[in-house]
Image (tube, rainbow, N blue to C red):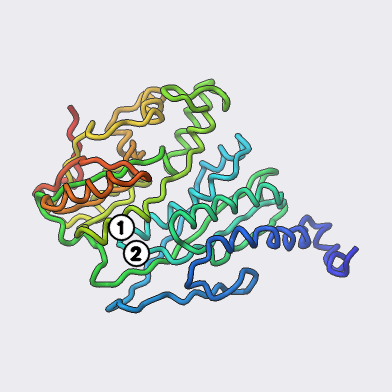
Amino acid sequence: MSDSAKRSQAYTAAGVDIEAGNQFVSRIKDMVKSTFTPGVATDIGGFGGLFKPEIAGMEAPMLVAGADGVGTKLKLAFMFDRHDTVGIDLVAMSVNDVLVQGAQPLFFLDYFATGKLESGVAEQVVSGVCEGCRQSDCALLGGETAEMPGFYPDGEYDLSGFAVGMVDTPKMVTGKDVAPGDVIIGLASSGAHSNGWSLIRKLYDESGLKADDTFPGTEKTVAEVLIEPTRLYVKPVLKLLEAVTVKGMVHVTGGGFYDNIPRILPEQVAARIEFGSWPMLPIFDWIKEQGDLSWPEMLQIFNCGIGYIVIVSAEEADKALDMLDARDDVDSYRIGEIVESEKAAEQCEVLFP
């Protein structure tokens, strides 16, 4: 037994294995380093991560930060014993928020907490975090692994994290210039992302479906459809920002269309959405049918196939759509327009056929 192991016997007897934690950190070092960008100025294992941002050419650099978790979608990871995608969800929920104001995500930090550290599971989770960071050119700068015996049920864990990005203040996307006649472009989601899972899990439990069954309307298994990770919009949106003037952006998360779109609109305008102007993913048809929900109810809870929204002038709409259509990492659709609105009126109107 090593001297370190001898010194920590009492803590190990209480359920916290310091040696296992140290070995876990050692095993994930190469994965974490694969996310490092030129601004990273430290190795993992320090008390704080160091990052030196490149600010040359910026008039007034502004930091933008966002924090989030994965929510009860984690229950499906436990149920299906599939842990390599929830880390992508974790990164996406924060970096997509930071992106809304036009910021390039710089770095991400994660927090993984469990009752007993199972290194194989934890490594799968971190592999997903690293993949999410690589997809968004964002460095995994550090994090925390907490082993807390008796605090979590056996085999379960919780995740949270936050991202920090940067934008030049004159180029910040605020929504203040959104005006009647502007075009609303929707970027396709990959599924339900990380919202509404308490309801989805309830419907799944009631459905009688099994993990290996074919999900209705698809050729994928139930587990594959339900655990599909949140799409990252960083790369296509940042490229779009270089070419056109984007007036406003929305990350469609909890609260769906009705709560998220008004968050970035001036008081005098509203969003008019043409329902049916984008294809509906099978998971949302299934949720609606299984839960006996209306489409307005669905749009209040879920992204319903549109995970991110950009608003541009009518003059630049075709250019924006052409740029997005040329990419192979996201589909885009013209889903509505901005109209005049009275101050007291609802700021998101969905027109159904």
Picture layout, residue 68 above or below residue 208? below
Location of residue 351 (image quadrant)? top left
Q: Position of residue 141 (x, y in %)?
A: 54, 67
* Residue at which label 1 appears: 239
For the residue labelled by badge 2, is the local secondary structure a helix, a strand or a loop? loop
> Which residue corresponds to the image point at 72% horizontal and 51% vertical from the top-left?
116
* Residue at which label 2 appears: 103
Q: Amino acid at mark 2?
A: Ala
Horizontally, residue 145 falls left or right of residue 63, namely right
Q: Residues within 10 Å of mark 2 (few under 14, many from 20)?
A: many
Q: Which residue is most to the right? A: 1
Q: Position of residue 179 (x, y in %)?
A: 11, 55
Q: Amino acid at mark 1?
A: Lys
> Which residue corresponds to the image point at 33% horizontal and 75% vertical from the top-left?
61
Q: Position of residue 62 (x, y in %)?
A: 33, 73
Q: Which of the two marks, 2 or 1, is nearer to us in this view? A: 1
Q: Position of residue 113 (x, y in %)?
A: 63, 55
